[in-house]
Image: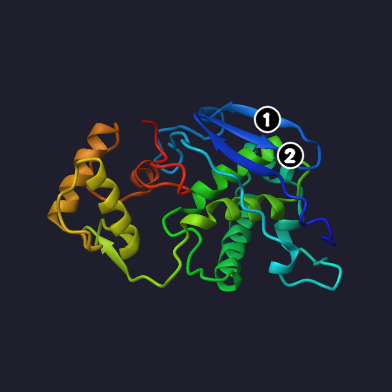
Amino acid sequence: MGCADAADKPAVSFGGLNLKTTHQTTGAVYSAPVSNFLDVSMNFNRKICGLIGAISLLIGTPSAFAADKKGAYAIDGGGGAPCKAFTESRRAADERAAGLFAGWVDGYVSAANQTRPDTYDLTPWQTTDLLLVLLARYCETYPEDRFEIAVNNMLNALHPTRLTERSDKLIAGSAAKGVPVYRETLRDAQKSLAEQGFYTGPIDGNYGKALNKALIAFQKKNGLKATGLPEQETLYRLLPLTPETGASGPK
């Protein structure tokens, strides 16, 4: 499948408690409360609470990617499918199709990490489950867009908060119940907790009693399970998806 129109990407901005999307081709503006965009359930991988702040989507130019002289390139696998195929697979609970799309996203992120300048990890703390939730809401709004365009737009939006250099990974907590996390992500968590008055220890990226206690206090205040671990739901509330948003969770 050719992709000469791959640069035709919607621009996304997050304003207040609404997610406003302007489609570059149609000019249509879609706005709705963020609670309509993010799945909420008791499963911590699905219990996501709103986006705050404002960001303009960073659009990559065709020259930033390998392609032929006309800027066209082939898309293999699920990336070439329309967005509606992805959303339909989720509604149907089609585990095989869901696995194919999830695998395609992981592969695309890995390739982007390898090819984008000053990038080590575009999604340093975001799990594939969270990325799929965000993609599902995009695809519900623009069902005819290729899945590859949705993924690329999402990564452009996440680009400002990427990990630009390699960081050690450690296990926060016990070996049996610990959470793998970048040391740099822990530094960011310590900074955010300190700014909110939960943490008074050093900003060193280490996981110890002080950080555990601060995380428990933060989790209790925000109605989360008080594990003291930097789990996905906690990081979503604590860290920004973009520099402009501040903490992702509601204030």
Q: Which residue is mark 1?
A: 30
Rendering quarter of residue 176: bottom left
| Closest to the observer, 114 or 133 | 114
Q: Is residue 26 left or right of residue 94?
A: right
Quarter of the image that includes the N terminus: bottom right
What element does badge 1 sit on?
A: strand
Residue at 21 percent of width and 59 percent of height = 207
**Image spot of residue 57 (x, y percent):** 61, 48
Q: The residue tagged with tag 2: helix, strand or loop?
A: loop
Mark 1 residue type = Tyr
- Judging by the rendered image, the residue that carries numbered circle 2 is 23
The amino acid beneath tag 2 is His
In the foreground, 57 or 177: 57
Residue drawn where x is 22% and y is 47% of the image: 194
- Whichever of callouts 2 and 1 sits on the residue coming sooner in the sequence is 2
- The residue under the point 39% across, 31% down is 250
Where's residue 42, x and y in %? 39, 34
Q: How many marks?
A: 2
Against 55, is 158 above or below? below
Does any portion of residue 90 appear in the rendered image?
no
The quarter of the picture where the C terminus appears is: top left
Image coordinates of residue 93 in percent, x first then y, are: 60, 41
Disc 1: CA contacts within 10 A as few (<14), some (14-19) or many (>=20): few
Cβ atoms under marks 2 and 1 closer than 8 Å: yes
Q: Residue at x 57, y 73 (%)?
A: 114
